[in-house]
Amino acid sequence: MDANLKWIGGATLVVAAVLGGVALTGAGDPADATPSAAANQPKLEPMGAIAAKAQADYDRLYTVRRILPIEGPIKYGEWYWDDKDVPPGPLLVTVDLQARVISVFQGGYEIGAAAVMLGTDDHPTPTGHFPILYKDRHNVSEKYGNAPMPWSLFLTTDGVAIHGGHLVENGYASHGCVGVPDEIASRLFAIAKKGDMVVITDGKTMGLGDSII
């Protein structure tokens, strides 16, 4: 289920509960009802402020609230990780093909970044929104000579994943996967869950206050 629907769905249930509570407390013998009592009933607007707050909270969690202080372009082999004092929040990972960089966000705070290895023209890394389908700590690629792909987070049914296990250096490429340094792969694997979203773009830039998705 889409996260947005979860939030709005939850708000809908809250509103339904409020309406239900009013109906229950106001229920009784019809003969006891009087025009003055009906006039004093609270006027309710379904959804209203509760739904608006739920939507605002959802949008805030997927808004860039911090960017790691990294000077200059990230070079191959470099990685950064800082989750100290970052409040709990949903995990969201971005990969940009032009920048060749992965960013890890928790509740809108960037906690990790690294240069990545990507696919080729013959085996391109796909763009789009990909929920993590499943994880495999000790995965090897049977399709490509049992190449090690540890800490794999699978994004597609045909094997595209974020994983460690390869040299992330200029001149190296994958068969469509996103290869990251082992230090980032292991940390991301530890906190990622099935269903967490990975957004792969081709030339998109973001700044503070921008929406990630």
Image: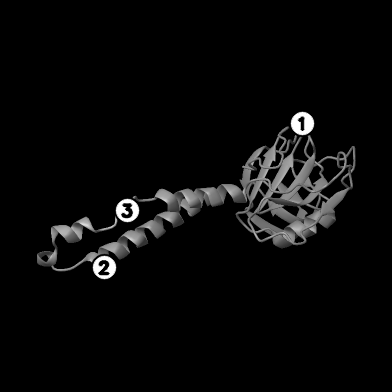
Is residue 171 toward the left or the right of residue 184 in the image? Answer: right
Q: Is residue 168 left or right of residue 128?
A: right
Residue 50 on image: x %, y %: 44, 53
Whether label 2 touches label 1, CB < 8 Å: no
| x 17%, y 59%: residue | 36
The kind of residue on which mark 1 rests is Asp
Q: Percent x, y for residue 166?
A: 85, 50
- Identify the residue at horizontal 55%, vertical 52% (top origin): 57
Which of the pair 72/150 is nearer the observer? Answer: 72
Query: How far apart, in angstroms, are the residues tagged by discs 1 and 3?
Result: 57 Å
Q: Position of residue 122 (x, y in %)?
A: 76, 32
Q: Which residue is mark 3?
A: 44
Q: Secondary structure at mark 2?
A: helix
- Please tell me the numbered disc located at residue 25: 2
Residue that numbered label 1 is attached to: 121
**90 lies above or below 212:** below
